[in-house]
Image (cartoon, grey):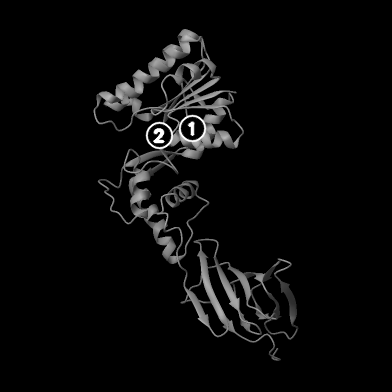
Amino acid sequence: MKILVTGATGFVGKNLIAELRNRKYDNIFEFDKETDPNLLDYYCKKADFVFHLAGVNRPKEQSEFMEGNFTFTSELLNTLKKYNNTCPVMISSSIQAELDNPYGKSKKAGEKLLLDYGEETDAKILVYRFANVFGKWCRPNYNSVVATFCHNIAHNLPIKVNDSSVIMSLVYIDDVVDELICALEGKENRVGDFCEVPIRYTVTLGEITDLIYSFKKSREDRTVPNMSDAFTKNLYSTYLSYLPEDKFNYELKMNIDQRGSFTEFLKTPDRGQVSVNVSKPGITKGNHWHHTKNEKFLVVSGKGVIRFKKVHTKKIIEYYVDCNKLEVVDIPAGYIHNIENLGNSDMVTIMWANECFDPERTDTYYSEVNSKEA
């Protein structure tokens, strides 16, 4: 299948082409403003499907709206007609096509041109009025407030919010790409004369700003956002893609003593925290119990033994652990427990707790597993 993509180096174009190739669509004609214009004839003659994503969003002169969003569309359709190619054509429009501004008018004109072409030729037409699209590879300080805010906040640059109560309608780039490939395969989500991305988010500008700032702070307090919320998850992925290339890393606070170290890695609002525990050879750590807090231990380097004793009993339970056989050991509430390094090198244990550490309410009570007290 031969697929023509105009606007191939743009935000949506780059993401679409990358995923088309992931799905083994290899015969892709990429056309952009830097492409030899003579190639348009060949592409229009051979194409089995057209993704028309080229357009003008932020021109120097208002007249460029019509030139980029209407004139080139007309040229594209005339070239298809020249070769009697009635393959399906998808056009990237905007929700602003309903507005009375130069950009909206140019998008509306492009839509009408395509719809008329469909009536004239019986070609299948797919008009998508996209909401604000956000995601990786979008150009900041251009026409996307999400891209601009993610970039500026990640780079410690100021942002300007005139009205935080402004309501925005957004679609995520991966959802856009999924829908476009559905359209390619004849399974578009159609509503009347238009097609749409079924997953859309409605949020205020203030909510977006607060979330992005929280993402920045999360690297300092070791938290992870609530990934069960789809918009938060997608916005977080977007934010990370704008990190400066020399700032992908960040340090953690290691609590070091003669026994080894203990380092908090991740904290979540509802799924507890993950830490890394390093024990020197011969060292025993723990010897405490919890009323409600529970943990999971996973030794990933070295070998040792985890011992348990239920409070008010004498019976000791032992689990021998070794990095050569990865297994998780649950630490139930009400059991005194410790972990001893039996090897000749440092033992590294990944520890998960069902709640984040609260110094005001630690739920941790000292008691030795090996104590003979019942």
Compared with 171, 332 (above or below) is below
Q: Amino acid at mark 1?
A: Val
Is 170 left, or right, of 328 in this rendering? left
Name the mark on residue 131. Answer: 2
Depth order, front residue of 218/193: 218
Picture coordinates of residue 70, whole percent (x, y): 35, 20
**Earlier sequence position, callout 1 versus callout 2:** 2
- The N terminus: image quadrant: top right
**Residue name at image x 45 percent, y 64 percent:** 250
Q: Do tag 1 and tag 2 residues touch (Cβ < 8 Å)?
A: yes
The local crowd at label 2, few if under 14, some if 14 to 19, many if 20 or more residues have their Cα within 10 Å, is some
Up/down of 165 relative to 52, above or below:
below
Q: CA distance from mark 1 to mark 2?
A: 9 Å
Q: Look at the image and tell me in which quarter the C terminus lies.
A: bottom right
Q: Against 364, is 128 above or below?
A: above
Instruction: Give the camera-side residue of 275 and 291.
Output: 275
Query: What is the total number of numbered labels drawn onto the structure image?
Result: 2
Q: Residue at x 47, y 72 (%)?
A: 253
- 29 sits left or right of 116 in the view: right
Q: Mark 1 falls on what kind of element?
A: loop
Residue located at (43% from left, 19% from top): 38
Indicate the position of residue 287 as horizontal and vertical percent values: 62, 83
Toward the bottom, the furthest residue is 372
Q: Is residue 204 visible?
A: no
Whether residue 267 is visible: yes
- Residue 341, labelled with which disc? none
Residue picked out by circle 1: 197
Residue 258 x, y percent position in the rendering: 55, 85
Q: Which amino acid, by three-letter code, is at mark 2? A: Ala
